[in-house]
């Protein structure tokens, strides 16, 4: 790191800042501290500042590098950050709040960050998968996250049912039926699951919504 401050501090943003906020902070600082605006000793300092700003942005604008950096901060205790799982939970909360207010693009950023911070979280993959499956062109990626959620938490009825409905929408009825049957075994007699299995059996489950 070219600056003793942390990357978030360099850009002047919070640890849970969205990608749009990080980009906006970088653009503003890059204009303010661009070396071409200074002369003499001030230019030398501006060059150092600009290098630090660019380095901070390159890391924080990449979800994988950012998650790794946050984990380093957490382990070193160099910043008041919770562990990655706590950060992921906070990011999921923000994402769900944005979904409720119709801010899909911003929600997508927070969901992606949550998964990057805790890739073993079935909840993160589940919620992100459901969200993506409802977006135009997002079904295929949504299925990958839902499938991963099932792998991580194979005994969660809600995850299984949501995955079943999403796979049915993709016309992947064998997978959809298998997930629904798993859910039925875990919750025998559940009327919602039984009704869904009936739809799948009669071929009317292709429009299932999650």
Image (cartoon, grey):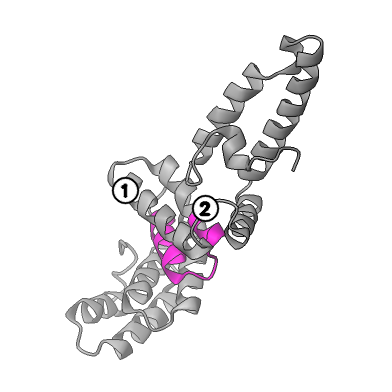
Name the quadrant of the N terminus: top right
Disc on the earlier residue, 1 or 2: 1
Dots 1, 2 in contact, CB < 8 A: no
Q: Residue at x 44, y 41 (%)?
A: 105
Dot 2: what SS?
A: helix
CA gap between label 1 and label 2 equals: 15 Å
Specify the label residue 113 is tagged with.
2
Asked if the stretch drawn in magenta spans residue 91, the answer is no
Determine whether, in the image, residue 58 is placed left or right of residue 102. Answer: right
Q: Residue at x 36, y 54 (%)?
A: 93
- Residue 29 lies, in percent from the top left, at 61, 24
According to the picture, the residue beneath numbered tag 1 turns out to be: 97
Specify the label residue 9 is tagged with.
none
Between 177 and 89, which is closer to the camera in this rendering? 89
Picture layout, residue 152 above or below residue 80: below
Dot 1: what SS?
A: helix
- Residue 206 lies, in percent from the top left, at 34, 65
Determine whether, in the image, residue 119 is placed left or right of residue 1. Answer: left
Q: Within 10 Å of the Cα at label 1, are there few (<14), some (14-19), or many (20+) other Cα atoms?
A: few
Asked if the stretch drawn in magenta spans residue 121, the answer is yes
**Residue 135 appears in the figure:** yes
Q: Which residues are magenta?
A: 114-133
Image quadrant in which you'd find residue 74: bottom right
Q: Within 10 Å of the Cα at label 2, are there few (<14), some (14-19), or many (20+) other Cα atoms?
A: many
Picture layout, residue 148 above or below residue 183: above
- Residue 182 lies, in percent from the top left, at 37, 85
Type of secondary structure dominating the magenta stretch: helix
Between 2 and 102, which is closer to the camera in this rendering? 2
């Amino acid at each position: 790191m070219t600056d003793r401050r942390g990357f978030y501090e360099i850009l002047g943003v919070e640890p849970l800042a969205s990608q749009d906020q990080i980009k906006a902070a970088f653009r503003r600082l890059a204009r303010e501290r661009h070396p071409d605006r200074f002369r003499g000793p001030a230019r030398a300092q501006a060059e150092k500042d600009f290098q630090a700003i660019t380095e901070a942005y390159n890391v924080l604008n990449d979800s994988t590098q950012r998650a790794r950096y946050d984990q380093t901060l957490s382990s070193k205790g160099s910043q008041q950050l919770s562990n990655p799982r706590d950060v992921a939970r906070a990011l999921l909360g923000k994402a769900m709040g944005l979904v409720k207010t119709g801010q899909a693009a911003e929600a997508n950023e927070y969901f992606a960050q949550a998964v990057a911070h805790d890739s073993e979280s079935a909840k993160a993959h589940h919620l992100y998968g459901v969200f993506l499956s409802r977006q135009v062109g997002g079904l295929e990626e949504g299925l990958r996250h839902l499938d991963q959620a099932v792998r991580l938490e194979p005994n969660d009825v809600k995850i299984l049912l949501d995955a079943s409905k999403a796979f049915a929408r993709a016309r992947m009825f064998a997978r959809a039926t298998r997930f629904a049957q798993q859910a039925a075994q875990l919750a025998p007699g559940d009327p919602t699951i039984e009704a869904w299995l009936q739809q799948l059996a009669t071929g009317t489950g292709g429009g299932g919504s999650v």
